[in-house]
Image (cartoon, rainbow, N blue to C red):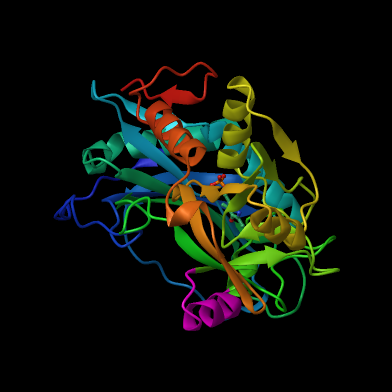
């Protein structure tokens, strides 16, 4: 399939690199392709960024058939454009599609479209430390028919946003509330998919935690409300007595690419890791015994987000003296170093754009 290109005639003014925030600004162009049962994915195009008309009956607005991805492009010190494990994002997007009854797309083609779009808007990749170009591929149902069933038409889009560090305060540890009632996902549900509705369903708990003075929630399993699953929209690790423990992947946990990279790095450093069920009670017990060393969330947006305080029922504990832990810092430096081309890439994670 060929990608047609219409370039903007009215380029936008680029934002101040030191005040980007997250997801507030968008580049000059976007990628679109459409799906119809008789045509498959077709009409691949890069066009000027902007709004498009939607029918009020558009299926995505009623039954929420929508999935997305989040990835980043960086500029290396030599000026090269680098993507971090993008083929993993494409594979996961197709797994999300499968769960939400959205048709599969050609992953190589989509990645090629993404690199072409990034290359076209390359001047939007910020260079200040901690900044990147955030890539947001997403797919949604477009039938204009009411009735609960899988849509017969879809749209795949990619938009790009220059972003600053996820947390304005930098790598400062955040406080986390263990959510006792609401759950993010349950076995047999859609938790392993980056499905839009998962995030809508998480907002109320997030709002309640913020009202209590916490910045994010720690999600527990849906059956017993006993085992740790994720923190906000990140995977989570606890360093207990020098062992880095993260919940093992079931279908209620989003398989993070950062999580996988963190596990790979830890193993290469001979730091013991465990993927297993982890009870909140075990974390609080470890803290009482002085064995809880550090904790952090991990994901593309923040990379590593240290946890400095954990509130559960009527208890609250401080982790690592409220400071970032040594392994958290080493992971952050290494992952961002590889992503930005400042460190060697021993695992072949980085895709260099050749234009
Ligand atoms: C995207 C996401 C993550 C992190 O995945 P990465 O591939 O590391 O960015 C973790 N948990 C949830 C719920 C997510 O949506």
The quadrant holding residue 26 is bottom left
The residue lying toward the viewer, choosing from 67 and 304, is 304
The residue lying toward the viewer, choosing from 38 and 203, is 203
Q: Is residue 197 visible?
A: yes
Tell me if residue 80 comes above or below residue 170 in the rendering: above
Tell me if residue 256 comes above or below residue 200 in the rendering: above
> In the image, 29: left or right of 145?
left
The residue lying toward the viewer, choosing from 287 and 101, is 287
> In the image, 229: left or right of 88?
right
Q: Is residue 103 visible?
A: no
Looking at the image, which residue is at 30% across and 59% down?
168
Tell me if residue 143 comes above or below residue 156 in the rendering: below
Coordinates of residue 259 in the picture (x, y in percent): 60, 41
In reply to whether residue 31 is colored magenta, the answer given is no
Looking at the image, which residue is at 57% across and 30% down?
108
Looking at the image, which residue is at 35% across and 24% down?
341
The quadrant holding residue 343 is top left
Region of the chain picked out in magenta, as a range: 203-215
């Amino acid at each position: 399939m060929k990608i047609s290109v219409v370039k903007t005639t009215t380029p936008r003014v680029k934002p101040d690199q030191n005040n980007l925030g997250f997801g507030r600004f968008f580049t000059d162009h976007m990628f679109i392709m459409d799906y119809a049962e008789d045509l498959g994915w077709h009409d691949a195009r890069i066009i000027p960024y902007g709004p498009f008309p939607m029918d009020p009956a558009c299926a995505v607005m009623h039954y929420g058939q929508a999935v997305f991805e989040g990835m980043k492009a960086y500029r290396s010190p030599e000026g090269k454009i680098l993507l971090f494990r993008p083929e993993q994002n494409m594979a996961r997007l197709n797994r999300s599609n499968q769960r939400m009854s959205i048709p599969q797309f050609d992953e190589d083609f989509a990645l090629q479209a993404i690199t072409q779009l990034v290359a076209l808007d390359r001047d939007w990749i910020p260079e200040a430390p901690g900044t990147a170009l955030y890539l947001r591929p997403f797919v949604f149902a477009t039938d204009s028919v009411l009735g609960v069933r899988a849509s017969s038409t879809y749209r795949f889009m990619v938009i790009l946003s220059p972003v600053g560090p996820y947390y304005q305060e930098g790598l400062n540890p955040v406080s986390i509330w263990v959510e006792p009632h609401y759950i993010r996902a349950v076995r047999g549900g859609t938790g392993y998919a980056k499905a839009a509705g998962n995030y809508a369903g998480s907002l109320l708990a997030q709002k309640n935690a913020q009202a209590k003075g916490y910045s994010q929630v720690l999600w527990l399993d849906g059956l017993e409300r006993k085992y740790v699953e994720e923190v906000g929209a990140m995977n989570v690790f606890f360093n207990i007595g020098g062992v880095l423990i993260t919940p093992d992947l079931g279908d209620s946990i989003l398989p993070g690419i950062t999580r996988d990279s963190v596990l790979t790095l830890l193993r290469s450093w001979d730091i013991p890791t465990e993927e297993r069920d982890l009870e909140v009670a075990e974390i609080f017990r470890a803290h009482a015994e002085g064995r809880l060393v550090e904790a952090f969330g991990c994901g593309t947006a923040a990379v590593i987000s240290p946890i400095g305080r954990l509130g559960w029922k009527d208890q609250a504990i401080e982790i690592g003296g409220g400071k970032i832990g040594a392994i958290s810092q080493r992971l952050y430096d290494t992952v961002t170093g590889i992503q930005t081309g400042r460190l060697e890439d021993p695992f072949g994670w980085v895709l260099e754009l050749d234009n």
